[in-house]
Amino acid sequence: MKALLCMALGGCLAWGGLTKPIASYDIKAKLDGGTHAITGSQTLTWVNDSPDTVGTLQFHLYMNAFKNSRSTFFQESGGQLRGDQADRSEWGWIDVKRMRVVGGEDLTKAVRFIQPDDGNKDDQTVIEVALPEPVKPGATIRVEMDFVTKLPKVFARTGFHGDFHLVGQWFPKLGVWETKGFRYSQQGAWNCHQFHANSEFYANFGDYRVELTVPSPMVIGATGGEPVAVRKNGAATSYTFRQESVTDFVWTAQPTYKRFERMFVADKQATPAEIREVVRVHGISEADARLSDVKMILLLQPEHADQAERHFKAAESAIKWYGLWYGRYPFTTLTVVDPPHGGGGAGGMEYPTFITAGTSWRMPADMLGPEEVTVHEFGHQFWMQLVATNEFEESWLDEGFNSYSTAKVMQKVYGNWPAPLQVFGFNVSRWLGLPEMDDFRLSRAANVASPDDDSIQRRAWEYCNASSYSMNSYPRTTTLLRMLERVLGEDSMLRVMRTYQQRFRFKHPISIDFVTVVNEVSGRSMNWMFDQFVFGNKVLDYSVASVTSDEVTTPFGVFDQPGGDKKTVSSDDAEKQDEKSKGKKSYETVVKIRREGDAVAPVDVLVRFKDGSVEWRTWDGQYRWAKFTFVKPVEVERVEIDPQGKYFMDVNWSNDVWKAKPDKAQVARWLSTILFYAQNAAIWAGALL
Amino acid sequence: MKLTTALSSAARRVGMYKGLWALLWFAFTALSLIFAVPAVRSLGPLSRLPEAGPKYLPGLDLGFMVEWAMRITPSAPGLLASIVLPLIGVVVLVHVLVSGGAIYRLLHRGRVLDGASLYFWRFIRLALISLLFYGVVLALAAGGLRIAGKIWGEGMEAKPAIIGEWVIQALSFLLLGLVATIFDYAKVRLAVDGSRKTWRAAFASAGLVFKNVGKTMGGWAAVTAMGVLFFVLWRALENAVLSRTIGAVVLLIVAQQLYVISRIWIRLMYWGVAIELDGALRLPPEETALGPAEVLAGPPPMESGTEAEPEVDEPSGGEAANTDQPE
């Protein structure tokens, strides 16, 4: 019997997940539905997978960001995030009551708050504890902790609203030890940032076993999907969840959730033709291209129950296309949670195998907000739950990558979408004839609006302001990746992204890792793109500066002849000569291209002539301008910079084209449209006077 | 007077002055060109884009419009100060002149320019007074939304809050219509009475509208419904024209301007209905610009600027010196 138990224990301790666990947690927690407080105890198992001897441990206490107005988070955000205002009567916090090494000393008194980023002594989102015995390279330490977490009213991704609870960033979470040479580390040290208004998270992979005790009427959802054990105990019920190879654990509880389940059946969702296409593009086997089945669990608010199908379709589309493009989703479950009205601050967030979406009552079918957020948050499973970049320091690697991927899925599955203009529960924008949208064009427009506030790559709290953080992390990166796709070609871009995903799954890459993959897979150096836009903040703008097409005439004046003689041609003679050769004219066309911005990029120039002939030139953009001269029997008709539309980052496309004759029909249509809108606006205005 | 009678009389009255439609169309178009021409000029370089270029969708797509706006408006306050505010001022002035001239024409068969100048300052004052009334409506709407938020905003369900918002929005729309109707009647009252007492006209018209809300707002609702019908017809036609050839563009322009004329007709109908119902619902004023009626053996002598008021149920008839014949 003893032998059997040891074998079972050994089996449990063995590495059974998708990656080696570095920071694993065994947590027991109990929710008090009345006070919205969680009493918990956890055992952290940390493997020192580095060559360093580590004498301290550092933990995130994220929930203390919502403790008072002196926290770094509160000071940077002013108490609001993503349009949500913190409720000043319901703060959130976390207290570590006790900490000790398993089988060793009590460390409680050795715990102290530190502020590694800004020195704000009032910020309590990071603690450090000195270990009585350092952890040697390759060794494991197990630490027990008792803690109490008080949830705030839903704000900044976590909290409660009524009897809805979204419990995220709720337990003491170990930082990441980075040895010298790992990521940007100059020496072995903890990477454990304070919780900033603009930052998200970063952690090691590990295995989680979490037992949650909640009031029995609660419907519960968590990382890991289905509980492995359920135990009723009077008025409370305990659920045990397990999930291996993840960086976080989140859960939710609400008594009135409507729970829906559906299987994503891989063989039914991805057609053989689509699998073959993946095989062709990536040169991999069909087995590697195939997707795997996923159990989708949907927890919807009762008043949104009629939108279950929309959420499932969006989740299926995301699992399918992210999987086909970047590699199958490796987990067996996906939980999608819909926060209630008033709990929107918990919406639009990603955790391992668990996402929060967001919708509204009577959301019109052609207003694709719920779909977009579901696809986007699922996409984060790939960009930063699997490829676990540091969101504090390199937000573009997850938000921007995911925004780009989301835009591709939305375009593929839903096409362009109408402006969200709702009147009494109906979207009227198509009916009014308003223009439609697509994510790539909107991202580009955002880039045009503020192309150079900051470099794309900065630590989250070091951007000029919150708007710059958003701009650079999301739409500017989307625009950049779209440009990269256009420059490399779609197949090449797919190979780049899949290689990057597969190579760095369950790892912690940095920006330069992606650049290396781009260069390697494409076979070209694209450093110029990343140096100027990611690590710099240059602006790309080329223009057709001038175009002339002048008839070539007979020259006049004094000309040297062979033998030393000189010949004089008068202007009259020259004119007579021109008259004689009227039917054989030729034209000298001079095209000047100018680099208006400070970003340098090689650019194609197309010159089309009136006889239909075409000349292509390529300019390296190094100097401020370039000139191309052509002598042809016809005049120029059109000059176009970047005719294939590769340079999405060019902030002004309107100066990229010169045409001899304007498109009159287009001008007339624009004038009539704008005039018409203006007339109607003028008449409307009069209705009220 | 029945509402249907008022509507048909108003339609006949408005139908007699097609020149007025043309004049109003001209005024609104000229006003709109102040904005439209510079806007299209700023788009000028884009006219040289190839028709099916990969960069732009074949219309004015939203991404392109945002880019264009970002390029031409470096600062919102600057835009507001240099373009939007002056444009609003011009719009107000044109509307005051247009309404004065139109009502004078519809009511007295007078010349549009005479009416425009005669009523200019009265209608300016009326427009300023209307801001007070609209302010009350907006305050009620804001208050209603706040109350709805307090009652339902903290709940777990959005449905009651959303329905509450819809109800408030619908009521606000009706209240805005009510205020617009009040000031249509106030304009007519000033024109009928020849009075300069704008505050009295505003409040008296409010009283009239409230006392006869069925007919007055019924008239507003009927004309508004006609406007919605024209809009639906216009949208159906616009959706059917997808081509971008010169011929299709010309057809679209013609259809657009026909729709604008229909909007002008709707605008005139609001005033026409007000004229018809004002006469029917009000007691005659103690003193009128025309003076007390005389019983004469024959037709009254014609004097410049005055003419007999037409019978309520019959189209306006008779000649008037110094005025144009009905068109």
Image (cartoon, grey):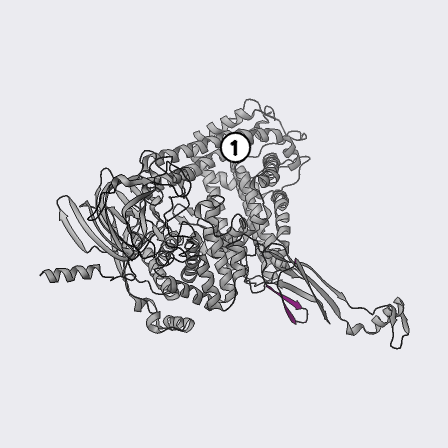
In this picture, residue A355 sits left or right of residue B111: left
Q: Where are the magenta residues, as a range? A: A599-623
In this picture, residue A111 sits left or right of residue A669: left
> What residue is rendered at 44% in x and 65% in y?
A496
In this picture, residue A400 sits left or right of residue A264: right
Residue A277 spot, x, y in % from top left: 40, 72
Q: Quadrant of residue B141?
A: top left
Q: Amino acid at mark 1?
A: Phe
Which quarter of the figure is the N terminus of chain A placed in?
bottom left
Residue A44 spot, x, y in % from top left: 25, 50
Number of dots carrying numbers: 1
Residue A339 spot, x, y in % from top left: 31, 47
- Report the front residue among B153 and B196: B153
- Report the front residue among A337 and A142: A142
Q: Is residue A193 visible?
A: yes
In this picture, residue A492 sits left or right of residue A677: left
Q: Secondary structure at mark 1?
A: helix
> What residue is rendered at 47% in x and 67% in y?
A520
Report if residue A602 lies within the magenta region: yes
Q: What residue did someone put label 1 on?
A: B183
Which quarter of the figure is the C terminus of chain A placed in?
top right
When the figure is inspected, residue A398 is found, relative to residue A503, above or below; the finding is above
Q: Residues within 10 Å of mark 1 (few under 14, many from 20)?
A: many
